[in-house]
Every structure is written in structure tokens, then in C-alpha cells.
Amino acid sequence: MNPDSLTDQLSLFLDVLETGSFSAAARRHPLTPSAVARRIDGLERSLGSSLFSRSTHAVRATSAGLAFAERARRILAELHLARAEAVSLSSAPEGLIRIDAPAPFGRRHLAPAIAEFLVAYPGLDVQLRLIDSFVDLQGTHLGEVDLVLRIGPLADTRLVATALSPMVRVVCASPEYLARRGLPRSPCELEEHDGLDWDSLAPPYAWRFEQDGKLQLCRPKRLRMTANNAEALLFSALAGLGIAHLPTWLISDYLLRGELLPLFCENGLPAPEPSGIYALRLERETDSRSRLLLEFLKARFGPVAPWDLALQSGLQRH
């Protein structure tokens, strides 16, 4: 069904609901009362539910009709918003979009994506600010910027979040480390190894594995290095200092090149974590420039992240 016919059908339904009469609703449309009745009959058949009870003098909504009316109003509002946005974007969009993002993810993935976005939309400009922390827990810069990229669980329900990509975490180590210390066959053997871990604000699903149907903490007993930055842990893993549990967006290239080896991935990549990579904003109805960028990033990074697709192919070859 095209948007115009859907809009007409829902508008007609709501007019019948409001006026309580096919005749009164017909006066709002270039239709006869019998044509209105036929269209409502068709809508009810397509839904498989009776929306109105009919009598000689009035038409009243059933409980199903009242429930459908709430949805119909929301759908019409979204269609009107979509049309308005399409009109605003039919001419070349212009203006500035301000973004904060964690530095490691920003350097590897966001900056190249934004460069591609700006080539496609020459009238737009982006101010990208990379912040040092691995996760921006509070979205503290919102208000100063239009969007904040956030990695991890969502704590502040006042912020509007758009999911950009799932997050997968893989246990990994360098070939040199594994040749020296041996290969752990299961997560419960990790405590016998040297580890690399966060010294604060540890991701909630780091070192957690499903064992006997439950999520259990299994991590190395000795921590050769702790840091508050994911890249520092990556460099330590590459140097052969120990085992790390890092997100695939950070380590996929090193895994594909064999500079790091994945552990416990005999059956493919682990399942994505409940939390992922999000764009946060303050306003539920964001401006058309930011919405355009959000749609671009969602298509670029999801629903399956490109770095995970590359890893899935690489693991299958091995």
C-alpha cells in the first residue's frame, strides 16, 4: 500500500470514529456514505477485526477500533513528519552537525564514515570531537553537541538513543603469548593465565561467559596490565603480555591478519552483548541534518557490523 492510500484510509477511519456517522465522514471526503462504508468494510477485512458496531442511527467504535485508533493517529503523525522531512531534504541539506565520540571508535570507524557522508552531502559540515574515555557514561556533552556516540549500557533514560550497531566481544591473545603459555581450552582455564583488564569502569560483560546455562565471571588471576583505555589493552595484547577480552570493532583487523588469535570461537563469533553502540540526543524529534546522519550511520554500521561480517568470513576460512 502506498503512503497516500494508507493516509487516506486511516484519515477516513478516524473521521468516522470522530463523527460517529458514515454520512458525516463522507462530507469531509469526496465520497458517498456508501463508499465510506465499503472502505471501512475493506479495512476491517484486511485487519480481520470489527472496528465499528453499526446501528440505524450511529456507528460506534468497538474496543478493537479504539485500540486501532491510537495506532492510526501515531502512524499518521509519523507519515506527516516523514513527508515534511522529505520536503526539507529535497533541496540540498546545509548546516553544521556537532558530534562527540570515544576516540578509539572515532578514529577507526566514525571518522571514515563521516568523511564518506560529507562527500555525499557537500552542503553539510561536521564538528567531530573525540573524547579520551573508552565509554561516555553520562553523555555529559549533550547540549553542547547534537549527537554523542556511546558504547555500552544506557543509564540515562532521559536521553533518546538510536542503536547503530551491536557489540561482540572476543577473548584474544598474541600467537607468541599462546606459544609460551599454552592455549586455554575453556573460559574456566583463564585464571591460570596473565590478563589485561580495565582498572575502572570495566564493561559489564567483560570476562563473562555462559557456563552451565549461567553467566559466570572467568578472568585471569594475574593482571599484567590494567588501563582505562581499550587501545592500551590492545597494544599490550599485541606485545604478548597476556590475554584480553576486547570488542571486535577494535581488534577485527588484528584477528584477520593473525597478529591476535581468537579464543573460544570454534563455533563462530560469540553472541552480541545486550548493550551496543548508540547515538544519544536530547530531543526526540531531532533536526533533519542529524537525522540524515543517523540513518547513514545505521546503514553503515548495522544491523550486522562490517567488522563482524569480515570476521565471520575469516573464521569460516580457518
Image (cartoon, rainbow, N blue to C red):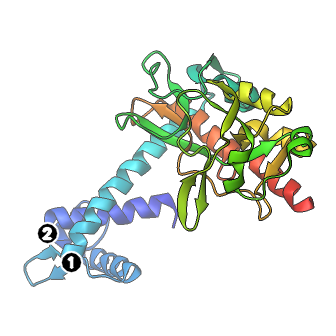
In the figure, is residue 41 to the left or right of 57? right
> Which residue is rendered at x = 70% and y = 40% of the image?
246
- For residue 197, what is the image quadrant? top right
Depth order, front residue of 278/31:
278
- Residue under circle 2? 20
Looking at the image, is mark 2 or mark 1 nearer the viewer?
Answer: 1
- Extreme-left residue of the structure: 57
Against 67, residue 151 (above or below) is above
Against 13, residue 42 (above or below) is below
Earlier residue among tags 2 and 1 = 2
- For residue 249, what is the image quadrant? top right
In the figure, is residue 205 to the left or right of 263? left
Kind of residue indicated by mark 1: Phe
Classify the position of the C terminus by image quarter: bottom right
Dot 1: element: strand
Give the label on residue 52, or none: 1
Dot 2: element: loop
> Which residue is rendered at x = 45% and y = 39% of the image?
154
How far apart marks 2 and 1 lie (CA) works out to 9 Å
In the figure, is residue 308 to the left or right of 150? right
Asked whether the beta carbons under mark 2 and mark 1 sit within 8 Å of each other, the answer is no
Depth order, front residue of 168/203:
203
Q: Position of residue 218 (x, y in %)?
A: 62, 49
Against 57, residue 17 (above or below) is above
> In this view of the protein, can residue 29 be seen by the observer?
no
Q: Position of residue 12 (x, y in %)?
A: 30, 65
In the figure, is residue 194 to the left or right of 167? right
Q: Position of residue 163 (x, y in %)?
A: 54, 44
